[in-house]
Amino acid sequence: MSKINILDPSIFNKIAAGEVVERPSSVIKETVENSIDAGAKHITIEITSGGIKRIRVVDDGCGIEYDDLRAAFMPHATSKIATVEDLSKIGTLGFRGEALSSIASVAKVTLVSKPKDSPVGGQITIEGGQILDVSEVGCPDGTYITIDDIFYCVPARLKFLKKPKLEESDCTNIVTRLILAHPEIAFKYVVDGKIIYNTTGGSLKDSIYTIYGKEMVDNLVEVNYKNEELSIHITGYIVRPTFTRANRTYQSLFINHRYVINQVISTAVSKAYEPFLMKSGFPVFILNLEFPLDKVDVNVHPNKLDVKFEDSNKIYALINGVISETLYNINHTKTISTYEKVKEVLHPNPVDTTKLQTLNPSEGSNYHPSRDLSSDKEPEPKIKDVTLSDDNKKDYDKSLKDAVSHFTNNKTSIFELRNDEAKIDIANKILDSNYAKTNSSQNVGQNSLSQGTMRELAMEYKIIGTLFDTYILLEQGEDMLVIDQHAGHERILYDKFKAEFEASTILSYDLLVPYILNVNSSEFAYLMDMSDNLSRLGFRVEEFGYNCVKISAVPNLLKDIDYVAFFKTILADIENGSIKKVDMMNDYLARSACRAAVKAHDKLSDMEINSLLSSLSKSNQVLLCPHGRPVVIKVSKKEIEKWFKRIV
């Protein structure tokens, strides 16, 4: 066996640098966090060639005393903790005392610093861990540090760096997180001589605007919640579900203003968004959680990106509940606000103007090809009246009265009638038996009814009609609302199924042939630990040999599911340590609602339309289908006038 050697500091510092200084973005994170801990109000970050050639950080913080310059670059030298007890209540971003020594061991470093009350500053120059010079210099208050040629003395590490543009992207990503974590600090970020960000030290919303732009700011929803039991304060913003992104890079999570990556919290937020999102989208959020210092452990890894909590299950439940409640209180109506965004949808191909001369003047409003379109006065639209004979009118009035009486007395949704083949669709029967007897067009008759004013909701609507037997068109004040009948009914049924599922005792279905599930030891322990939860959901799960479980009963609702896929979904959440009843069932409840809802091209009667609109108008009704598609799209009168060039 080889003799045990004590490594030279120049060697073990380079080994330690592999944990702390992975790439240029790590250097930026560590040095800027030092500036923040120093109380800086203004911080400038400059990089050249993705930070590989040069990184410079300048701050106006408290500075470093001349006599402490050498000690600052010693391993495990720090001013932020002094005793082992301090590790249980870390309030600074840095505390390990590894960053400067690790950076200096793999790069060329020059640091100049001056405390406010010192007459002169100091400068130290280090290359590859060797101190070349320490001297007094004249300089402003604060600190600036320049790091040149990262990994120049460790070729094996240098060759694994990415191309400068990719390293620049990582640097920009970490600067973005630092700005969002500390919006009160004025940051200036310069890349190859070009200013990328220049914040003023204002509010979080100002910082979001600087980084992501106006469109995101317009979709922000504030979160501000305190939990006295857990002593947690949650602040920040989530973004409306209609404003999603293709990846998770727009998600920022901070614990006590420290950027972290935490699976428990991220999953809790994502699960809360699931009923509102299309499968291809990822939610956007910028959240900060204020914890008591002794309730969270940040001393998990040298990069300080991971944290641990005393009770992850409680944290998961709290975050999930707060975000879910916030999302349910959002108005999810999607608004079309610019002509540029809709013109491709309305006219993907050039308009054939010759067809405009062949329109039937009897359809819709009075049509006059020679009319001056620049006139602001439009002729009043005329809609044909339905002429009923005296006998037909009596039959119609009686049928309508009976229908309304049945609907009122039984308090039954028209949509429940549609989904029960044993019952009669009252509204359609009225239309078929009466309008068909008239000499007028049945379609014109339905349009005539649809022109009526429906009951007052948030404000008064007027039903214009239906489009393609799929979309309900409403006029509301200065806006036109377009409602997807399938998405709207699907949402109503989903909420109903979900409420019933949460409130009711779940019936189990005994499998004729039990399903045997082979798992690994971690999955087996997880399922056995959660067997009581699964039992309350209607499953009967038992041990069946080594790393094997037997499922002999499932909830009635899921008797036809794919068991392999279902339990694969459950085991995918093993890190969360719990099985959430509604979370687990969301996909299946959504699928059931989709199957039961009215479909596109189903012709709805006026009573059914009013029933749907009445349900959708209830307070806190989510206007997104369970898969995230919008139920309502709003187009303003002004926007429509832009389409027709009435205004520009």
Image (cartoon, rainbow, N blue to C red):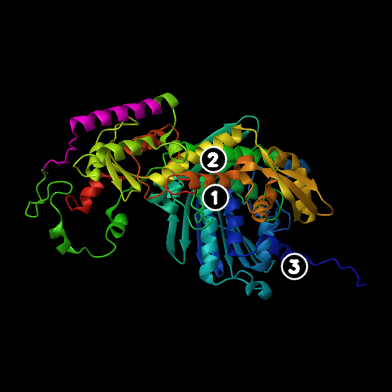
From the image, tell me which residue sits under label 1.
Answer: 252
Q: Look at label 3 and name its amino acid.
A: Ser
Check the image and name the residue furthest to the front.
Answer: 391
Q: Secondary structure at mark 3?
A: helix
Tell me if residue 249 comes above or below residue 379 in the rendering.
below
Q: Is residue 485 in view?
A: yes
- Mark closer to the chain start, 3 or 1: 3
Residue 403 percent coordinates (x, y): 35, 30
Q: Is residue 293 in view?
A: no
> In the picture provided, is 76 more to the left or to the right than 464?
right
Asked if marks 2 and 3 touch (Cβ < 8 Å), the reply is no
- Mark closer to the chain start, 2 or 1: 1
Tell me if residue 165 comes above or below residue 139 in the rendering.
below
**Closer to us: 157 or 353:** 353
Q: Going 44% across and 26% down the picture, which residue do you hit?
A: 410
- The region drawn magenta spans 379-407
Residue 133 percent coordinates (x, y): 65, 65
Q: Going 55% across and 70% down the picture, which residue do you hit?
A: 53
From the image, tell me which residue sits under label 3.
Answer: 10
Tell me if residue 100 comes above or below residue 53 in the rendering.
above
From the image, tell me which residue sits under label 2.
Answer: 323
Check the image and name the residue furthest to the right.
Answer: 1
Q: Please tell me how crowded label 2 is: few (under 14), some (14-19), or many (20+) other residues with Cα within 10 Å.
A: many
Q: Going 40% across and 25% down the picture, which residue do you hit?
A: 408
Q: Look at label 1 and name its amino acid.
A: Ser
